[in-house]
Image (cartoon, grey):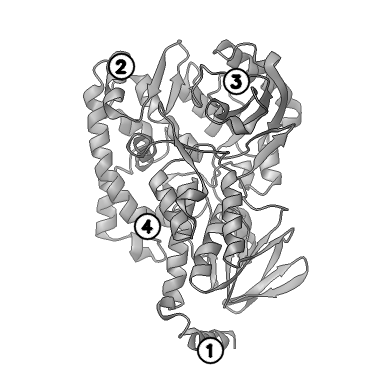
Amino acid sequence: MKAAIAGGGIGGMMTALLLRKQGFDVVIYEKDDRLGGRLAFVEKDGFKIDKGPTIVLLPEMFREFLREAGIDDEDYELIQCDPLYDIHFNDGNSYTKYADLQTQIEEIRRRFPGDELGFQRFMKDMDIRFRLGKEKFLEKPFFKKKDFWNTPTLQTLLKLKAYKSVMENLKTYFSHEDLRTAYALQTLYIGGNPFVTPSIYSLVSYSEHKHGIYYLKGGYASLTKVLENALLKQGVTIRKGAPVNELLVDGKTAYGVSVNGQQERADLVVLNGDFPVAEKLLKKSVRKYESSSSCFLLYMGLDKIYQDKNIHQFYLGEDFEENMNQVFSKEVLPEDPSIYVFHPSVVDPSLAPEGKGVLYVLVPVPAGDHIDWEREKDSYKEKIMIRLEEKGFTDLQKHMEWVQIRTPKEAMDEGLYMGGSFGIAPTLFQSGIFRPQVKAGPYTNVYAVGASTHPGGGIPIVMQGAHVLSETIKKEWNLSSFPEKREDHEHSIRLSNL
């Protein structure tokens, strides 16, 4: 049986490896000249830096799914970050997050006296909620209303306090506003507004302490080559420069895809593009989605390494709530933006010529095409560079050998819905049953995987989605006895096409 996968992002590659293990003949059709999707490098003059994701979260889940796909731990190297990162507030104060909980309690006692017990309650409560959320929402799909609208699931939602926002929930634990911000800003990892995003996503900041933050040596995008080698080794066919233009259907069954005008037959199809864009292939009315935030990104090659900096840094403006309002509600360029800085050269000398370094700067900005980025990008870059120099990256512009700018316009041109960097927004009504599922109706043998499908965004969670998808296919195609059942199943497929 043949599986056609439209798109070679992390979800498509993981799904291909898992379906290959189930016995499928798998072909990946990728529109670009490379695999990886958002996992890519910006490379210039001997420098390379991640273009997209940088922070490895949920490392055990990450390792577990790679093992399931046939990739050994020795094929890549994870480096634990400790301290996790620094958060710099506008008044000059800073807060450092640590892997060790006792060290973290001491940091809170110094910086935010009186909130130590609240932090301990937060971690204890999140321990329970993480187990509940993982079982009820990460590890299962919601194909039918009764899968979600039942007493146990609704009781779990109440226990997770999904009716509260992340920021509102944190008021239960922390009296200091800056500390609440320090445990709310992580919703920006998945493009969500912490003042609106459901409190279930407080589990992201909890997980940083519980499971740690890691760096993938050589850059996160080096995972693409690891996966591609595994795909080739396991016999998956990879077609690059091969966009899927059309889904070939007969009644309620797809029998293949059209690629560059050629019909390619398949027994099942998996869509791995950003779902609101890929959904157009389903030939049905497209739902209106709310995009995640986008990013204004600067990639730099430097003639030095800032050895006094941690690998991850956050710099916040004077009014974080107004910053979020400008990004998500007013949809204007933030006047006093929050800035994330990634400086992997402090732990990885392989990314640049000897003695030199790379710097990645991310500013959350509105998604959409209403901002004239060609007019705004250079002046906004200057604004960000001046801010960073003021915050401790001394003479940054003098040490910069080159800089490359990426705006939401480039993200949109590359196929990300509304230029949103993280898939659709993690709002209440775009989570759980309200999010596109791995079974992408109305066709019986068409599926979907990626950041905009359930269970959501972030590399380990997309891997979880690929696992859920492969288990769904295994069940629907009765593959427990594969390949003995193949003839019977192919007969049923032929009958359904009549």
Q: Amino acid at mark 2?
A: Phe
Q: Give the residue pinned by disc 4.
A: 139
In contact (CB < 8 Å): disc 1 and disc 2: no
| Residue type, label 1 | His
Q: Quadrant of residue 109?
A: top left
Residue drawn at (28%, 21%) of the image = 175
Residue 442 visible to an observer of this rendering: no
Of mark 3 and mark 2, the one earlier in the sequence is 2
Q: Nearer the viewer, residue 216 or 430?
A: 216
Q: CA distance from mark 1 to mark 3?
A: 63 Å
Q: Is residue 101 left or right of 347 when viewed as pictured?
A: left
Which tag, 4 or 3, sits closer to the chain's start?
4
Regarding mark 3 in the picture, which secondary structure is present there? loop
The quarter of the rendered structure image containing the N terminus is: bottom right
Q: Mark 1 or mark 4: which comes first in sequence?
A: 4
Residue at the disc numbered 1? 491
**What residue is shown at x 76% (from left), y 27% (from top)?**
375
Work out whether mark 1 precedes mark 3 in sequence or the reverse, and give the earlier one: 3
Classify mark 4: helix, strand or loop.
loop
Q: What is the C-alpha distance between the residues marked 1 and 4? A: 31 Å
| Residue 114: x %, y % from top left | 23, 17
Please tell me how crowded label 3 is: few (under 14), some (14-19), or many (20+) other residues with Cα within 10 Å.
Answer: some
Q: Which residue in the structure is indicated by mark 2?
A: 112
- Pick whichever of labels 1 and 2 is earlier in the sequence: 2
Residue shown at 55% from the left, 27% from the top: 326
Report if the CB atoms under discs 3 and 2 are less than 8 Å apart: no
Circle 4: residue type: Glu
Disc ID at residue 305: 3
Looking at numbered disc 3 in the image, what kind of residue is underneath it? Ile
Q: Is residue 170 visible?
A: yes
Left or right, 297 with reference to 481: right
Marks 1 and 2 sit apart, C-alpha to C-alpha, by 67 Å
